[in-house]
Image (spheres, helix red, strand yellow):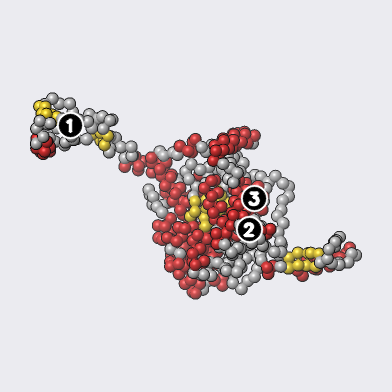
Amino acid sequence: IPSDFHSIRLQRIPNIQYARAPQQKMLMGTFRKPRIPGIRIPLRKFPFLSGALCIFSLLVVPIPKIERQESQFPSRENVIQQKTLLNDSICSRFPRPSFTASYLWQTNLPKIVNASKNPLLPGLLNPEDDRRLYSLLFKTLPASRMRRAVQHTPSTSSSQRASVRHIFRVIQRRLHDPENNPPLRIAVFGGSVTIGRGCEAGKRAMQNYNCAWPMRLQLLINQFFDMDLVKVYNLGVGGTNSGVASNMVKYWMYPTELAKVGPDVVVNSYSTNDSLPPWDLKDDPNADLATAVLDQARDGLQQFIRAALTSNRCKVPPLVVHMDDYLGPQQDSLLGDMSYNTAMLQLAKWYDTFAISYGEVVRDIAWLLGDSTFSNKKDVHFSNWAHQTIAWSFGFASLELLSTFCDDEFARAVYNFTSTAEHNMIPNNHLYLPPPLTRELLRKDVEEKHAEALISAQESYVAMGCSNKTAGDDDNELEDRSPCIVSWIATPGGYGAPQISHFMDRHSKNSGVPIQGWKTENQLAEGWGNKIGWVATQSDEQQR
């Protein structure tokens, strides 16, 4: 009995149910002491009675029955009823109420092994390569390691949430009725790594699309489901960076079959080329290359993100995915070679996009153990096993995205859960973009910049007449959105020194102008960033 209790009322209490009192709360219920008259005993005068009274109260006074409040959680019947709302979703195909990417990956490993075999490369279909494939998946790259690939997934309150819902509806409808629904369209942008340079041993081709990871990703998914569930377009261009990809997205520079509808998913795989230190700082011993690459990668990748998120105008934007497939070597500092991953993660969180890192899956194996399976110590290009692991990293991360999506959909259907931020922060406007994330953006200004971005998005929404358009998430209407009659990207083209010399000799014969003081230059041996070109050997030379 507390010392501040000077008296206690003694009386046997009948079995009654106490009334609620909000001032005395207990878990799942409330109660208060009943006001019942009885005998008042001053305990200060009889302190020895305190212990006796306490024991007496335990023996005589029954424990009050606590009235339970009505639970805020739904009943079993309500859960079953609400679950039926998910039956038309792709989530109905998986364990409910929840599942993990690791569970799906581990329980389907034998099937994943078979789906990873590349029929387009018959030379790799042999028992030795099958054993290597099995060893990588079951021993070197368990689910606990594959989880490192998941860097960031879009949240419930994200403007990209509509994009996530769209891609899973496309997949569900393709699975349900493949004859009348197209596959998921994935456009991958990148450099020479993305197009498979150096992928197949013994071949020095500038590109090898059948060996590169985008094709392996398509084979992995389609062979696993035994149908053409996805179509991956490899739009990589060697020697380019995110700036080129931004223009390709902005000016709708897609293959003919994709240009009419646009991609459902756009993947930026420029981690290698965006990690190249600026040429003007390359030989400066005092230059902070790690910071320079960080700023360079952030600027280029952010430009791509903003172009992609507004590329569909009034419609749901494509899901933006970042694939970090870079392990070096382009500078001596390890922190410098990790700068791209830092920039990617900053932007993925700021724009709430989907970030995947092959580098994080195998970085310790490649760098600390020197395993050449996943990287090349002398070159940024790597073998077919690295490309296959990139495809696995993408696949595992996609399962994590699916798991998160289904968790949120279940919460919406069963618990009627809706994020407050979804209403208060993100407008129902696919043209909204947060203020650019730069060194100049200050904490004290960000709220005002956000408000300005909302106003700008609304003005664009009205100017484009978006309110008068039906922007269904499964809209496949044919509409070429390129603002240009003709558009192109200039690339090295694969010309060598002999071809250039032959071209210039023919030009000289046709024009009658002799070639003096000019020659072809080939510096490819000094690094992938150097090109074959036509250069002057003397000062003040002109070529007509």
Q: What's the residue at 62%, 34% (across, down)?
A: 459
User: Looking at the figure, which quarter contains the N terminus?
Assistant: top left
The amino acid type, in three-letter code, at marker 2 is: Ala
Residue 259 visible somewhere in the drawing: no
- The answer to which quarter of the image holds residue 202 is bottom right
Residue 482 visible somewhere in the drawing: yes
Label ID, residue 5:
1
Q: Secondary structure at mark 3?
A: helix
Report if the CB atoms under discs 1 and 2 are less than 8 Å apart.
Answer: no
Label ID, residue 287:
2
Residue 171 is situated, as x and y percent measured from the top left of the image, at: 50, 51
- Residue under pointer 3: 246
Considering every residue shown, the one lying at the far top of the view is 37
Label whose residue precedes the other's in the sequence (3 or 2):
3
Considering every residue shown, the one lying at the far front of the view is 45
Q: What's the residue at 57%, 56% (across, down)?
A: 340
Label whose residue precedes the other's in the sequence (3 or 1):
1
